């Protein structure tokens, strides 16, 4: 399967294959390519939702770390961690999934039910 054709790749291809084009056209395409590359490398700050989720993740991690041997279900986290009490199970699960991928939380299954503990 070939790579996805991006705008930057298309502009690079067009510039390299326009040998008989006027200089102004090539300069214009090069300027567009430079602007596109500059836009893609600009540092991005986290969204409000990402910042909010990071705070919830810290609260969950703190609760799990208090008793590292205890296994928590998502519902127990919702009831036992005051910071996430108002969140849905799905949102808490998504936050915990992020903590698992960061290696901060470990998932344990018991009788087809998922439990979590600090890693």
Image (spheres, rainbow, N blue to C red):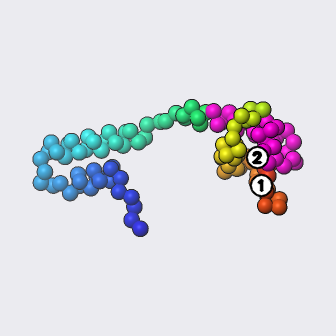
Q: Which of 76 and 18 lies nearest the eye of the viewer?
A: 76
**Residue 109 lies within the magenta run:** no
Q: Is residue 85 above or below residue 7?
A: above
Q: Which residues are magenta?
A: 52-81
Ranked by sequence position, the earlier of labels 1 and 2 is: 2
Q: CA distance from mark 1 to mark 2?
A: 8 Å
Point 68% across, 49% down: residue: 97
Residue at image mark 2? 74
Q: Residue at x 34, y 42 (%)?
A: 36
Q: Quadrant of the N terminus?
A: bottom left
Q: Residue at x 12, y 47 (%)?
A: 22
* In this picture, residue 40 sits left or right of residue 113: left
Q: Callout 1: helix, strand or loop?
A: strand
The one nearer the camera, 30 or 60, is 60
Q: Do labels 1 and 2 touch, CB within 8 Å?
A: yes
Residue 58 lies, in percent from the top left, at 72, 36
Q: Is residue 64 magenta?
A: yes
């Amino acid at each position: 399967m070939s790579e996805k054709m991006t705008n930057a790749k298309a502009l690079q291809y067009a510039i390299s294959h326009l040998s008989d084009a006027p200089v102004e056209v090539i300069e214009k395409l090069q300027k567009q390519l430079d602007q596109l590359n500059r836009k893609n490398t600009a540092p991005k700050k986290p969204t409000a939702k990402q910042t909010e989720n990071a705070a919830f993740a810290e609260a969950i991690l703190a609760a799990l770390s208090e008793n590292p041997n205890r296994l928590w279900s998502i519902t127990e986290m919702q009831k036992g961690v005051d910071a996430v009490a108002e969140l849905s199970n799905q949102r808490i699960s998504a936050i915990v999934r992020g903590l698992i991928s960061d290696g901060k939380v470990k998932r344990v299954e018991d009788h087809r039910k998922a439990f979590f503990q600090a890693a």
